Image (cartoon, rainbow, N blue to C red):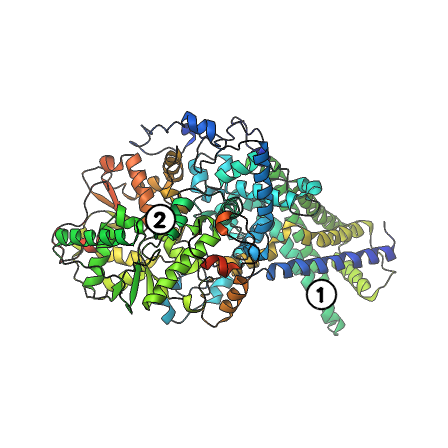
Amino acid sequence: MLGSTLLIVVSWVLLAIFVAAFLVRTIRMAKLPMHLRWELAPVPHERGKSHYGGSYLEEFEWWTKPREKDLTKEASFMLQEILLLKSVWENNRRLWWFSFPFHTGMYVLVAAGGLLLLSGGLELAGVQTAGEWRGGISMLAGSGFALGAVGAFGLLVSRFVDPRFRGYTTPVALFNLILLLAVFVTGGLALVASRNLAGSVWDFGAALVTADMSVELTGILQAHVLLALVFLAYLPFTRMMHFVAKYFTYHQVRWEDEPLRVGGRLEREANRLLEQPVTWGAPHVNANGIKNWVDVATEEKKT
Amino acid sequence: MSTKKVRVKDIGKRGDEVLCPIIPEDLTPLPPPYGEDEPAWKELSEATTNNVVCNLDGVVAVSLPKAKDEAEEREYVEKFRAGLKKLLEKNNNWTFLQPLILSLEYCVNCQSCNEACPVFTSSGGKEIYRPTYRAEVLRRLVAKYTKPGGRLFSRFTHGDIDLNWTTITRLYELSYRCTLCRRCAQACPIGIDNGLVSRELRKLFSQELGWAAKELHEKGTVLQLEVGSSTGMNQVVVKDNIEFIDEDMADETGIEVTTPWDKEGADVLLIHNAGEILSWPENPGAFAIILNAAGIDWTLSSDEVAYDGVNYGLFYDDVQLARVAVKHAESAKKLKVNKIVAGECGHQHKAMMTVSDRVLTGDLAVRRESCLTLLEKIVFSGKIEFDPSKNDFPVTLHDPCNIVRNLGIVEPQRRILRHLCPQFREMTPHGVDNYCCGGGSGFAVMSPNNFTDWRVSVAGRMKLQQILDAFADQPKPEVPKYLCAPCSNCKGQLRDLLQYYDVLEKSNITYGGLVELIVNAMVDVKEPFIKWEMH
């Protein structure tokens, strides 16, 4: 077991890595340049058309019509995707039985964490009864641990027994699942060891904020906290960041159907990108590292 | 190697063997009488097997010559490595960098996309056709050969792979086993696009190594930019051919047909896929009849490139894509037309209406529209009198991926068919969920070696099943049936598909475009416009 001081310091470091790496990777995704249009039907924000996959391009002289977007349909689509894993249900039912509890377990844990923050905040604000929520929050976290563990174990087994995954499962993919399984299992064991798990986690969180080096955790809870923080620090370096990437693949690729308008933002950005030099080496491209995209696209007949 | 499961890393091993041969018995069965006498595949000639790389699946689409010696192999491997890096650079690949990076870095190999792919399922589940297979090859190559410490760590993080001549030649051929239909992308919970990965691979080979399918490059975009059309027609020939079509249409319908050329200030610049003019002349003929009857102020352009809407750059090369798109827009600008209307050609729609949208800036930002919306406007305008009973035969609709799944133009063509064809019925699935004809991504114009056998009996297999199912209530040849495919490349594939399986004789199903059905229903056209013959 780590000493309290070491535990607090290690936790700070892991949290700092998580925050920094998460931000860097997310910003990197967001700052990728505008690309050529590559939308894919159905685009849910198409008002009155999304239920069959139609788009504004179905309109005669579409540029004369107002764009009618229904962002509630986008939100509804994403909620079904995120909360119910609808695409997995429709296209990969075998996997859904494990993937759904796995993801739901994590959502439940995030919700439990949010409730813990809320209850603590209210308590600090003088609402004494908020502290009584912690029993319920502990039970909620317990259900998250159970769902997550079942899902992670199922996914891990699938990686060995499902022939579709044979040859596509890397050591790191297995490690990720094992790490998460360990987080869920230790969380569950910590709850068994102490029914007031939420209270202990709150105390630990308060110690982190106040640099209280005297905080004490039970062995199993310390293991759980460390594993959870290691997971968080490691997360931004893995494909598990797909929950962030998904925003960009949907909103900036599949559903990004904004037409270019002369004088508009997209045109300015396109003109800027078209001015970049091209260095592709095939003879027909006829690039020399100085010519830009406009040059190579407007040169007369190439062979 | 064929008896055990092919692994991702096997792509670079034992280059003298076929990695994953196609076995006819593995293909999904077709209903009688089609499953009973599956045509035999063409044998590769000795010259081909001696001189051309054919070690992927025993099929040869791209006819890549074998390297002369190891030095040449190394030279191309180095070029590939350089291309890998350029594929990830903002200046060289801003065009698709974001979707590519997202697809490479965040796929968790859940395999939810597998069953959406008609090539993978029709083949009986051949590992190399699994949508994730070629993407995983690229992902591992990027991890190992472009990332710091890749050679040390990538086998743990991404899995093992070797970059060598065998890897790049098999991968090149494999990039031409995906029709870019993007059904896999629709199925992905994360939004990974394995179709895009196939296209980006083709782009790397084309823009860095100078390798591309001859039909798309030399005989495609290069010919189009040099002569004016990928068909080889120059300005004189295309005008002659259209004049001939006008005369032929007038003889057939009794209606005077004149196609206007280079009319400055016209409302509509119609751009056909020039393949229509040579292979399906009734299609541009029917367009002329309809537009004239509706009083549309329209024109064709005789400018080089502008009389051919083809833009095969969409399938393999951003530079060629941009060059052709610019030519189309320049012609419209020169004629001062109100808008370009894309004829019945799916990839032309996509290249012209959306993909080149951010290349055509300033005065090249010409308005561009689908012929389907214009035709819907005309059909329901009351300017032409129709008698739907003239189309009283079973009709089904093939949805071209590039018009429907990629642009979301789903209903205009259906509203026309419901209005003019009393026996219209849908395929299952249809609309944005429809299956590719098997000729997508340029395959329809590619027929070297034994590739026609593959694209028809593997890539087109699901489509044939869909067509037969749509007419399952009247399967016998006594009832003539019409497969409407408003896309030139789809028609090319469907022609080969129906001929290959003798579908006209066995089931009396013919195919054609949408405008042919519209003209067939016109009261002023006295004789049937649609003929039940293979063309």
Image point (42%, 46%), residue name: B217
Disc 1 is placed on an element classified as: helix
Looking at the picture, tell me which residue is in the foreground, B154 or A180.
B154
Residue B220 got which mark?
A: none
Chain name for mark 1: A
Secondary element type, mark 2: loop
Q: Residue at x 41, y 49 (%)?
A: B222
Q: On the picture, is A243 further left or further right than B451? A: right
**Side of B370 where A84 appears, left or right:** right
Q: Nearer the viewer, residue B41 or B460?
A: B41
Q: Quadrant of residue B74?
A: top right
Describe residue A252's horizontal placement relative to residue B26 as left or right: right
Q: Nearer the viewer, mark 2 or mark 1?
A: 2
- Residue type highlighted by circle 1: Leu
The residue to which callout 1 is attached is A117
Residue B117 position, x and y percent, is: 45, 43
Q: Which mark is residue B230?
A: 2
Q: Circle 2: is it few (<14), some (14-19), or many (20+) Cα within 10 Å?
A: many
Residue A168 location in percent, x, y? 59, 39
Return the residue nearer the eye: B160 or B412. B160
Q: Tell which subunit mark 2 falls on.
A: B
Q: Quadrant of the N terminus of chain B?
A: top right
| x, y percent for residue B331 | 35, 62
